[in-house]
Image (cartoon, grey):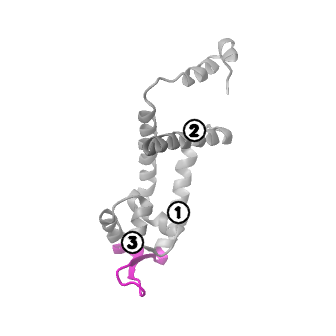
Amino acid sequence: MVSLETARSGTARDRTAVRRRETPGVGLGKLLRDADMIFNRALREELARHDISFSQFQHLWQLWKSEGLAQVELSRRIGIETASSTAVIDQLEKRRLIRRERDAADRRRINVTLTPAGRALQGPLTERVTAVNALARQGLSKTEVGVLFDIVERVIDNLRKARVD
């Protein structure tokens, strides 16, 4: 972090670092949205190399973390309606990356499980996601990345609390 004194007497880079911290009263949402859009564009391009959409990746990611989820629970974890998830699950099933099975104990429940082909994508897709994250963090120290995460989490918490109050 550059002190104001260093910036006044220091290099142009030091002055730019301070100038960046002089933020306007509005624009945080746009900045976060722009970061989200460009990050997701890069991620989608990497996933496309494996012919996987972002929605398909979200479903696979949840199944890699918790195999055999009920279709309703899978949708809930992703944050989309079950009807929206059904189309993605249909695509993944058609590609033989997942399968749906009725629960023997509760015939209303449909469990979604990975096939060997779906499990095999975990390594290659995780590598692509890791590469996009590394690109986004390029030039940032571990400390700066930690501070960035902390700040964004506080912004999220602030806005969540405001909704509750």
Quadrant into which the C terminus falls: top left
Under circle 3, the secondary element is helix
In-front residue for pair 103/38: 103
- Decide whether residue 104 is among the magenta residues: yes
Q: Quadrant of residue 51?
A: bottom left
- Compared with 86, 10 (above or below) is above
- Distance from the alpha carbon under mark 2 to that under mark 1: 31 Å
Residue at horizontal 34 percent and vertical 80 percent from the top: 108
The image shows residue 76 at horizontal and vertical percentages of 41, 63
Query: Within 10 angstroms of label 2, few (less than 14), some, or many (20 or more) residues?
Result: few
N-terminal label among 2 and 1: 1
Instruction: Evaluate if marks 1 and 3 touch, with contact meaning CB atoms under 8 Å apart.
Output: no
The residue that mark 3 highlights is 71
Q: Residue furthest top?
A: 9
- Foreground disc of the pair 2, 1: 2
The image shows residue 147 at horizontal and vertical percentages of 63, 39
The residue that mark 2 highlights is 151
The residue that mark 1 highlights is 124
Task: Give, as a single range, the part of the protein colored magenta.
Answer: 93-117
The image shows residue 109 at horizontal and vertical percentages of 38, 79
Residue at horizontal 62 percent and vertical 41 percent from the top: 145
- Distance from the alpha carbon under mark 3 to that under mark 2: 34 Å
- Decide whether residue 110 is among the magenta residues: yes
In-front residue for pair 131/38: 38
- Compared with 118, 142 (above or below) is above
**Res 53 visible:** no
Q: Quadrant of residue 31?
A: top left
Quadrant into which the N terminus falls: top right
